[in-house]
Image (cartoon, coloured by chain):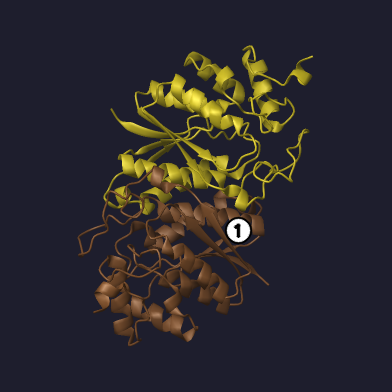
Chain colours: A yellow, B brown
């Protein structure tokens, strides 16, 4: 069975990406990153999702990106915005996907895997530079040059199967693949139980996606917002 | 003063690179990585080197690459070779420089720095794929696409000032710049005090470099080897 490494944050997109890789017949090795993100609940969600999809392995690498800061997700002094803004939002974590893909590449090399899946999305992507197709292509090229496998003639593939899909399309695809979205956490300000704020960019994109897909939103919101 | 991020392992090459960046007038922000490497003494060396060169800041990011393993440097079950071998050696850490440069890029973004220095070397490089010029160029291209700064029109430069130098040339350059190599640790099997084995690839390249440069080797070897 061909092995693949799947970056699994525990959110809606990465859960769908894992289900997709699974459906292609890959032996899925899920990789989560504990980078000091304020929405710690997504790590618990990643474990739930990985277990429910029967992955071959699931690892969590810890690295203290809060040393660097510069993002509302890793610096407690920068609040998560509750209204839409212009340009690249403060929830952008500097070089995050590059760090994540590098670690996935390292694990892929050790496993002898040539396929890496990442759930980035260029349509509803919140304005992050490292979610664009040209970025993914540049990383694929780098992977060839960076590794023992590349030097020895192997070919890495960075799969971003959601990159051109709307959030509604992602949800439809996930529902077809049997993803239980109640297990996932997207909210940047999720509390310890994984209950969502309903106000941040991630919550807004997610709720709008369920609405447009015509799928009942299974997100567990905080009680104060439910009434 | 223009800021730069300098990857500082605590070895001979990165100490020389830091001294070089310093000599160009950059405000140097040194970044070390505690990735579970067996030669922990290089982290203490990095602190000594950073302090002695009066850097603007020095951060150490911790990440458990030993979760991934696959290298003699991160897997205690794979011994460090004591005789030269063929091809890419087992001390190669999968995707290490990609992970390191990604983290340096993240910090550079937060600092508003456009210059990143890395002490890779393609001549006496021990056979690592991620020490080649084409790799560095590919990372520079990726950095443009990966970041807020790149999207907004800024230009990142990945400086690898040692890439075409022999170990002897690096040492000559460092001596000119006033580097005290007794503070550095290169040995892959250095003990807790930073005393070198004298047998591994890193020790052999280093000792041969001092010999060829006609510079007395200040490396502190373990007593059993001194007699």
For residue B153, side relative to residue B15 (left or right): right
Query: Quadrant location of the N terminus of chain A?
Result: top left
Report the front residue among B66 and A169.
B66
- For the residue pair A84 and B195, the one nearer the viewer reads as B195
Residue A86 is situated, as x and y percent measured from the top left of the image, at 75, 41
How far across and down, in percent of the image, does residue A83 sit? 78, 33
Query: Would you say residue A10 is visible in this rendering?
Result: no
Chain containing the residue with disc 1:
B
The residue tagged 1 is B108
Q: Quadrant of the C terminus of chain A?
A: top right
Mark 1 surroundings: few (<14), some (14-19) or many (≥20) residues within 10 A: many
Q: Residue at x 73, y 38 (%)?
A: A80
Residue at the image point whose x is 22% and y is 64% from the top: B82
Q: Is residue A131 visible?
A: yes
The residue positioned 36% from the left and 70% from the top of the image is B195
In percent of width and height, residue B104 lies at: 54, 57
Q: Is residue A77 left or right of residue B44?
A: right
Secondary structure state at the residue bearing disc 1? helix
Residue under the point 63% across and 34% down: A39
Q: Position of residue A56 (x, y in %)?
A: 36, 27
């Amino acid at each position: 069975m061909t092995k693949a490494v799947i970056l699994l944050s525990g959110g809606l997109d990465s859960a769908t990406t894992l289900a997709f890789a699974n459906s292609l017949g890959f032996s899925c090795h899920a990789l989560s990153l504990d980078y000091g993100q304020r929405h710690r609940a997504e790590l618990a969600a990643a474990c739930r999702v990985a277990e429910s999809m029967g992955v071959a392995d699931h690892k969590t690498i810890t690295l203290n990106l809060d040393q660097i800061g510069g993002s509302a997700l890793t610096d407690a002094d920068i609040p998560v915005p509750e209204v839409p803004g212009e340009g690249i939002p403060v929830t952008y974590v500097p070089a995050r996907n590059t760090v994540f893909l590098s670690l996935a590449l390292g694990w892929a090399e050790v496993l002898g895997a040539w396929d890496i899946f990442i759930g980035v999305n260029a349509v509803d992507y919140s304005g992050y530079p490292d979610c664009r197709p040209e970025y993914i292509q540049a990383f694929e090229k780098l992977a060839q040059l960076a590794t023992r496998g590349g030097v020895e003639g192997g070919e890495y593939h960075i799969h971003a199967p959601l990159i051109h899909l709307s959030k509604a399309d992602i949800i439809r695809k996930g529902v077809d693949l049997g993803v239980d979205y109640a297990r996932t956490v997207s909210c940047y300000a999720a509390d310890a139980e994984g209950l969502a704020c309903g106000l941040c960019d991630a919550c807004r994109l997610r709720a709008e996606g369920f609405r447009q897909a015509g799928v009942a939103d299974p997100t567990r919101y905080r009680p104060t917002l439910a009434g």
